Image (spheres, rainbow, N blue to C red):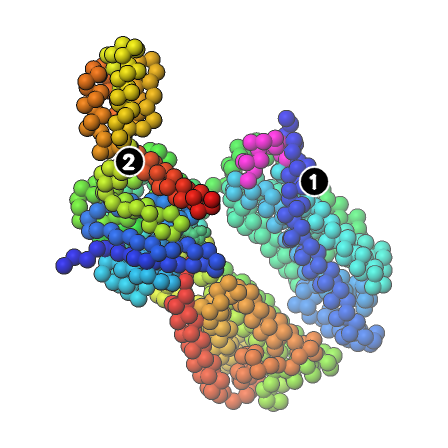
Amino acid sequence: MNALTGTARSARLALRRERGIAPWWIILLVALALVMVSYINRNMSTPELMATYTTMINRNSFFRALGGGFVVPELGYMAAWRSGGFLYVLNGLAALMAVVRYTRADEESGRIELLRAGVLGRRAPLTAALLVAGGVGFAGGAATTIALIGIGLDPAGSIVYGAAITMAGWVFGAIAAVAAQLAQTARTARAIGLSVLGIAYILRYAGDASGQYWMKYISPIGWSHLVEPYWSDRWWLLAIPAAVTAALTAIAYRLAGRRDLGAGLIHERRGPATAPGLRGPISLSWRLHRGLLITWAAGIACFAAAAGGVSTLAYQFTEAPGVTVDNLLKAFGGSLGGGAVDFALWAIILIFAHVIALYPVLMVQRLRADEIAGRAEAVQATPMTRLRWAAGQLVVTGLGTAALLAVAGVVFGTFYAFLVGDPASDIARLLAGTLGTIPAAWLVGAVCMLAYGLVPRASVAIGWIIWIAVAVVGRAAGPLYGLWGGTPFEPFHYIPNTVAGAPFDPAPALTMVALSALLLGGGLLALRRRDFG
Amino acid sequence: MMTAPISVSGLVKTFGRTRALDGLDLTVDTGEVHGFLGPNGAGKSTTIRILLGLLCADAGTARLLGGDPWDDATRLHSRLAYVPGDVTLWPGLSGGEVIDLLLQSRGGADRARRQELIERFDLDPRVKARAYSKGNRQKVALIAALASDAELLILDEPTAGLDPLMEAVFRDVVRETRRRGDRTVLLSSHILTEVEELCDRVTIIRDGRTIDTGSLPDLRHLTRTSIQAELSASPGELSGATGELAELPGVHDLRTENGLVRFDVEADALGPALRCLASLGVRSLVSRPPTLEQVFLRHYDRAGAARAEAAR
Ligand SMILES: Nc1ncnc2c1ncn2[C@@H]1O[C@H](COP(=O)(O)OP(=O)(O)O)[C@@H](O)[C@H]1O
Ligand SMILES: [Mg+2]
């Protein structure tokens, strides 16, 4: 038996499991690529319109950084510029997750031990994982190429674009292969991979925003951007990720050949031996989920700071093509005296509010996850029965949601005030506007809690549907795309746009708080009355 | 008057089309270690979950520590400790944190006792739960339950996943508890020797119904002792002598080989059988008491026979 025996069998097994996962990634990639083409076709239908857009984008560093570099008025280039920022990251993410799934995660769960007791070489799982992930990465790129050629974009450019997408997948597959050998658990391996992905993205973004393009050359995501498909088509630049992929794969193989099954170079951190403060439902919920809140707060702060930088863009709204501004004006309410800048600020605040509304959704889903995993069972047998247990989580969730909105308001307000506005008045004004959305975010969570109490099995799906209905189809995305003008069930549009000078009215907030209390009470009551576990 | 810490009668619980409990009875008296025996899927965990107020019974009554397990859950739970059958823990918490969480939410804990148990069970409390084996997760829940001063311990197959060494520690700790006599233990298990060794009384269930309950001597009484004797009689005499033995009512499966006599005897017939053996001159005698396994199998045989009967 050599180190590769059983590779084919492992790969077949992995492929079978991948059947339920990979198609979704590929569909997502192709759909995003096509949507961006149709977006550009719709909004920049004439050369003049496209020229206006490109001038506006090239003048604003935030916009430039979003897609990378600069734009030129050419459909294929614009489409790849618009979608590439997502597709490179997504394909990298898909490959990264796949490699960890078939290496360290299987090793951790003991599946590999079971197989290795049969005939499975030491390097077989890694080889199988790389083959499968590499195949999935290639399929993502190739499917995008075919789809774009299919709708009539330049074939050569489409092939180069597909190759850039594929290489982004491969390089992160190789990064994950090394991470899976270093870490002792799948969780740590994923964390390493995702950190590299995050750093790569930030380097690329910062490079494009600041014009310091050397940062793109040290970023694996940047390499794909540098190819500039449909424009300069510098496909030979993909030699960089190819070489890096080869080198990392070699390193992963060396590590895999040397270590024991289940061992890793990075040891898991140990926890405290005692927890004198851990008593009662609120402290439990805080202990369990503070990591999530801190991660969210950090992410929101980063984006709020970036959004503060967009404030430079706010002035350009007056120069933006009419459709977008018209849509914004129609959609976001407020007094006309406020002016376009204030509408843009309110739009950004609403985007933050919609994103943060996901936090209570996730927190309620965690209750359900604890219930089905049986983690809550031992606690239920103490006086911390389910009412107190769930109520503790709700307290942390409610305060956490408010805290996240406060972070968004303070950071965004401060950056805007110092970069563009007036520190004396703008910080308070933007913070107040952001805090005003708290009741609507609570309401989203409260609906989820009611679903969790009443129909636990469907509650996770319901949570996602509610959030997507509110955030994606809701006020922020809908109006921009001219799709939709609000609905009575989308709570955020009831909140007066005080940022743009609408008078403050406590009635919507009070109504939403009362409604939330009602829904939460109903959810808790239903939870109390049903079987648990 | 002291009421029984646990008294359950006619309990019924269905999950969709599965009838997990079908008229189950169970009474546990104060201060005893009560074995709750049944094969996998018999309904032990379901009964316990009803007693903990996690599930609501469809019919029948259940009383726990003088209260209603569903309505008074929060109040009653400060007086009991529980080890689930399949212990899953929050992956990010260390063993020590979970132990403290469970002890403190029940109110107070004896730190010395906690430390002693951690040492006896040889648990590293600083390891995160995601790195624990099943046995170690079980230990975490056991330590939290055994370190508490709860008057009722409900243990659902607590030794599944423990290695033999730790199983011995567990038995020692339960025996100490039993000697103190002020705590009641409900020990669900499908491991017969464990129940035999630890329990005062036993309830045997199957398919959601109680099929037998009583003290171990009571249950043994209903089963047969295995006897193996070496007789001084010559091989010629042996066949005649054993014939007499085989005639005795209550003696079964008599075999002789190489001067050894083996047979099973019912408790009532033990006296006459021994007298008969003595008259034949015994050189050596080995008697094996009935194991609970036999008690168990006897019920299965009975149920099996009844089913075969019904099918015919
Ligand atoms: N939540 C549930 N949903 C559906 N069936 C269940 C559930 N819990 C238990 N059962 C079924 O009830 C029966 C009794 O299960 P259980 O009480 O866990 O048995 P034991 O603990 O004695 O092994 C089994 O047939 C099991 O499949
Ligand atoms: Mg069970």
**Position of residue B111 measured from the top left corner of the image (x, y, whole percent):** 24, 48
**Above or below B256: residue B62:** below
**Position of residue A396 measured from the top left corner of the image (x, y, whole percent):** 41, 66
The magenta segment: A111-124
Name the one closer to the observer, B224 or A12: B224
Residue sitting at x 34%, y 16% = B257
Taking the magenta stretch, the answer to whether it contains residue B133 is no
The total number of labels drawn is 2
Q: Please give the label number shown on residue B111.
A: none
**Above or below B13: residue B274:** above
Chain bearing tag 1 is: A
> Image quarter for residue B170?
top left
Graded by Cα atoms within 10 Å as few (under 14), some (14 to 19) or many (20 or more), the crowding at tag 2 reads many
Name the one closer to the observer, A96 or A339: A96
How far apart in space, not on screen, are marks 1 and 2 (Cα)? 72 Å
Chain bearing tag 2 is: B
For marks 1 and 2, give the one nearer the viewer: 2
Could you tell me if residue A272 is visible in this image? Answer: no
Question: Which residue is label 2 attached to?
Answer: B223
Residue type, mark 1 in image: Ala
Left or right of residue B12: residue A411: right
Name the one closer to the observer, A462 or A294: A462
**Above or below B270: residue B40:** below
Left or right of residue B56: residue A431: right
Residue sitting at x 62%, y 38% = A125
**Position of residue A172 measured from the top left corner of the image (x, y, whole percent):** 65, 48
Left or right of residue A445: residue B54: left
User: Do the dots labelled 1 and 2 sit on one chain?
Assistant: no
